[in-house]
Image (cartoon, grey):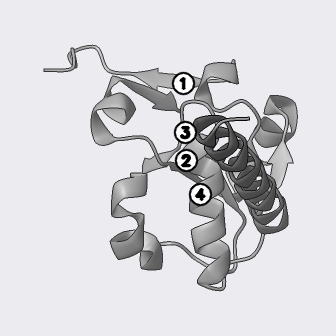
């Protein structure tokens, strides 16, 4: 086996270990909810859309507020620790990272929408005038 092949195999092994660690960190930080479970208690929770502002303005889950992942480190103090936090993004990637961050900051009762916004079929708010300009 050549040097390149050994390096590639080592890289793939290390990447696999990293992904496994991240999976367990996300799993320990938040509970994944199906869209039905997410919708069931949505009125009792803080619903946070961690997508960027332009995506949120175009359409979002009704009642959600936008705290983009890129601003979360500055704005997490806006969240209440005494209420459940329901997080979603486009597909679930940023939600996991957000949950890990919030858990480190002492927040509990963090829940993630399984499959993200792409999986949502509940009530949404669409902008009639926003065209991504």
Q: Look at the numbered discs 1 and 3 and tell me whether their residues touch, using CB distance below 8 Å.
A: no
Earlier in the chain: of badge 4 and badge 1, it is 4
Earlier in the chain: of badge 1 and badge 3, it is 3
Earlier in the chain: of badge 2 and badge 3, it is 3
Residue 67 appears anywhere in the view: no
Q: Look at the numbered discs 4 and 2 and tell me whether their residues touch, using CB distance below 8 Å.
A: yes
Image position of 125 (left or right of 103) = left
Instruction: Say which residue appears at 32% left-offset and 20% top-offset.
Output: 127
**Rounded to the nearest whole Å, what is the CA distance between mark 4 and mark 3?**
11 Å
Q: Is residue 34 above or below residue 30?
A: above
Q: Look at the numbered discs 2 and 3 and tell me whether their residues touch, using CB distance below 8 Å.
A: yes
Q: Which residue is mark 2?
A: 94
Q: How many residues crowd mark 4 within 10 Å: few (<14), some (14–19), many (20+)?
A: some
In this view, the mark in front (2 or 3): 2
Residue furthest left in the image: 133
Q: How many residues crowd mark 2 within 10 Å: few (<14), some (14–19), many (20+)?
A: many
Please provide percent x and percent y for residue 23: 79, 53
Q: Look at the numbered discs 2 and 1 and tell me whether their residues touch, using CB distance below 8 Å.
A: no
Q: Is residue 15 above or below residue 108?
A: above
Q: Is residue 133 above or below residue 61?
A: above
Q: Look at the numbered discs 4 and 3 and tell me whether their residues touch, using CB distance below 8 Å.
A: no
């Amino acid at each position: 086996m050549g040097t390149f092949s050994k390096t590639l195999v080592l890289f793939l092994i290390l990447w696999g270990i990293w992904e496994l660690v991240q999976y367990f960190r996300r799993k320990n930080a938040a509970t994944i909810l199906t869209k039905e479970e997410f919708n069931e208690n949505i009125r009792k929770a803080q619903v946070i859309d961690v997508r960027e502002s332009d995506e949120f303005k175009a359409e979002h889950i009704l009642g959600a507020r936008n705290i983009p992942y890129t601003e979360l480190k500055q704005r997490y103090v806006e969240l209440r620790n005494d209420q459940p936090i329901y997080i979603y993004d486009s597909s679930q990637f940023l939600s996991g990272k957000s949950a890990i961050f919030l858990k480190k900051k002492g927040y509990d009762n963090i829940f993630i929408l399984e499959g993200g916004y792409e999986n949502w079929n509940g009530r949404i708010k669409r902008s009639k005038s926003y065209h991504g300009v």
